Image (cartoon, rainbow, N blue to C red):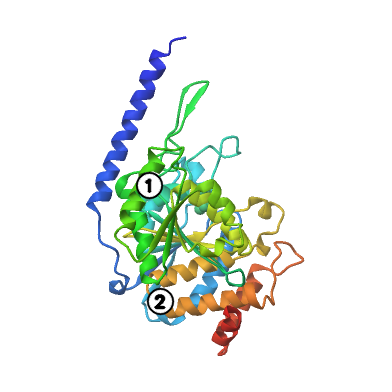
Amino acid sequence: MIHTEAIEKAKEHFAKLLEEQLLRVDQIKAGEDWADYSKLQPIIIGVVGGDGIGPYITKEAVRVLEYVLQKEIAEGKVELRDIPGLDIESRVKIMKALPEDVLAALKECHVILKGPLTTPKKGDKWPNLESANVSMRRELDLFANVRPVKVPEKGIDWIFYRENTEGEYVLGSKGYNVTDDLAVDFKVITTPGAERIVRLAFEYAKKNGIKRVSAVTKANVIKATDGKFLETARRVAREYPDIEFDDWFVDIMAAKLVDEKRRKDFKVIVLPNLYGDILTDEAAEFQGGVGTAGSANIGKRYAMFEAIHGSAPRMVEEGRAIYADPASMMRACVMLLRHIGFVDQAGKMEMALDICGQLEKKVVLTGRSDGATGAQFADYVMQTLQDPELESRAKGYKK
Ligand code: IPM
Ligand code: MG
């Protein structure tokens, strides 16, 4: 059978996508300056509760955040602002992944704390809208997804720099069914897009005295896009002769993260979007599960901080939302505080989380009624923050 018409339509579709992507390349190249939070007053933190367990764990994280920032809030240096309208029901009502008024409200903030949002997929009870996360990362150009994973007793101290606006994601909702039998998706890597994430990873390593950066691709098979990512990483690496650079394929990297002998050697890991998505869930598992990991989505102008996990609708359906672990959102708050320059407050909150979640564990969450509630955990964190011995309690652990 000849499919001339179908192929012509597909070409048209593809042409439009290429135009959009080339425009995006120009925008990245034009660049903009990094936000200077020391010049902003107040710094506005937008809060999006999210779906499922999102509003529950966000509420507890915000309680701790308000406690940590009580002075700054009282002095008008920081403002927390609720941003409604991003829950799945609201998105579905107007059939928009990221409603325009919500995007406008987000753009009035400087940084955002966001609970998990439901991402519909084919066959769900929801219409198959684009992911609001993906849309927000793209619209606010949050190109770096930074995910630290630390398990001191196992010698694990990783930080993942996941590219956040390209790869399989950027056109994830713009794939094409050429005929009933042929579906095609697109993967996009651009030179300036790869360059800015790799550079950020190297700059982090340089600032923190870290001597190794590893790139992860599948450039042996996905030759054009992953090839470009790897080639760009190699080129940028040459500008940092004091930092060792190596590269791994994603399959063997997934294995090496489990290898007790080798995994301690990894420090800063930079990788395209989808590989970053997968490996960071794997990595977080060593730390106690995705419920314990925070994630920073960094752009030059905006930044958004979130949990790395989903909205766990089953926990809500089964009446267990109050038992959800808010630690991931609290870790996101630590990253947020550090990003906007409140380094001391971030350090204290991190110590309290290490003590409460990993060292002493006097309040244990199980996700069920045999464990503590998120609110009890937040109380425990705030009590710990009041302890004048906070630092020595945390250090005992860090030995
Ligand atoms: C994450 C999540 C998202 C992603 C989903 C919800 C779209 O898994 O932040 O890792 O794939 O990026
Ligand atoms: Mg993920």
**Outermost residue, right direction?**
370
Between 213 and 134, the one lying in front of the other is 213
- Residue 342: image tag: 2
Mark 2 surroundings within 10 Å by alpha-carbon count, few (fewer than 14), some (14 through 19), many (20 or more): some
- The percent coordinates of residue 228 (x first, y second) are 35, 43
Distance from mark 1 CB to nearest ligand 1 atom below 8 Å: no
Q: Is residue 138 above or below residue 385?
A: above
In the shown orientation, is residue 102 left or right of residue 60?
left
Quadrant in the picture for residue 36: bottom left
Query: Residue at the location (43% across, 42% down)?
Result: 219
Q: Secondary structure at mark 2?
A: loop
- Name the mark on residue 15: none
On the image, which quarter does residue 97 sit in? top left
In front of the other: label 1 or label 2?
1
Q: Amino acid at mark 1?
A: Phe
Question: Camera-side residue: 43 or 191?
Answer: 191
Residue shown at 69% from the left, 77% from the top: 362
Question: Residue at coordinates 55% horizontally, 65% vertically from top-left?
Answer: 264
- Name the element at disc 1: helix
Mark 1: few, some, or many residues within 10 Å (few <14, many ≥20)?
Answer: many
- Give the quadrant of residue 315: bottom right
Residue matched to label 1:
229
Residue 117 visible? The answer is no
- Asked if 366 appears above or below 383 in the picture, the reply is above
- Whether tag 1 and tag 2 are in contact, CB under 8 A, the answer is no
First reached walking from the N terminus: tag 1 or tag 2? 1
Residue 351 x %, y %:
54, 78
- The residue at 34%/34% (across/down) is 17
For residue 326, above or below residue 353: above
Position of residue 142 measured from the top left corner of the image (x, y, whole percent): 38, 55
